[in-house]
Amino acid sequence: MVIPASSTEYLHVPVILPAGVDPGATPVRVAVVAHRNNPGDTEWHDADWAGSDARILIGPGSGITLTAGDYRVWINLDPPGSENVVRKAGILSVT
């Protein structure tokens, strides 16, 4: 995905949940980072569900303002049970 740095919009991250897992009962967080390491604790942001997508507002005035560059998008799902899933979801380019 490519967006301009001046845009404030929802970043949608498609998620495939395990069978029988209700997204409404599954907390989801998103991290958008410029480095190649796993996100640190302070880099995660609570996200919402929009159907089967996790979504988070990014851009000026959103709390996640990004300058031009390439970012790695990460997702963290905490479904009921013993799993706590962390995955790199893709690359976001900001122009």
Image (cartoon, helix red, strand yellow):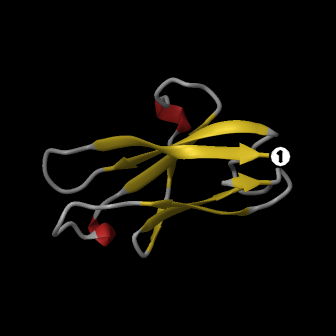
Task: Say above or below: 89 vs 24.
Answer: above
Task: Say above or below: 66 vs 37.
Answer: below
Q: Residue at x 39, y 70 (%)?
A: 52
In the rendered structure, which amino acid carries the disc numbered 1?
Thr
The furthest residue to the bottom: 51
- Which quadrant holds the N terminus? bottom right
Give the x, y percent position of residue 84: 26, 43
Q: Label 1, on which residue?
A: 95
Give the x, y percent position of residue 24: 32, 71
Task: Say above or below: 71 vs 30.
Answer: above
Q: How many labels were placed on the picture?
A: 1
Q: Residue at x 21, y 60 (%)?
A: 18
Q: For this view, does 82 lie left or right of residue 89?
A: left
Q: Residue at x 35, y 40 (%)?
A: 86
Q: Secondary structure at mark 1?
A: loop
Q: Residue at x 55, y 25 (%)?
A: 36
Q: Is residue 43 visible?
A: yes
The foreground one among 24 and 35 is 35
Residue 87's image quarter? Answer: top left
Residue 25's image quarter? Answer: bottom left
The furthest residue to the right: 6
Other-residue count near label 1 (Cα within 10 Å), few / some / many at <14 / 14–19 / ≥20: some
Give the x, y percent position of residue 39: 49, 31
Q: For this view, does 59 lie left or right of residue 26?
A: right
Q: Is residue 59 visible?
A: no
Q: For this view, does 81 lie left or right of residue 25?
A: left
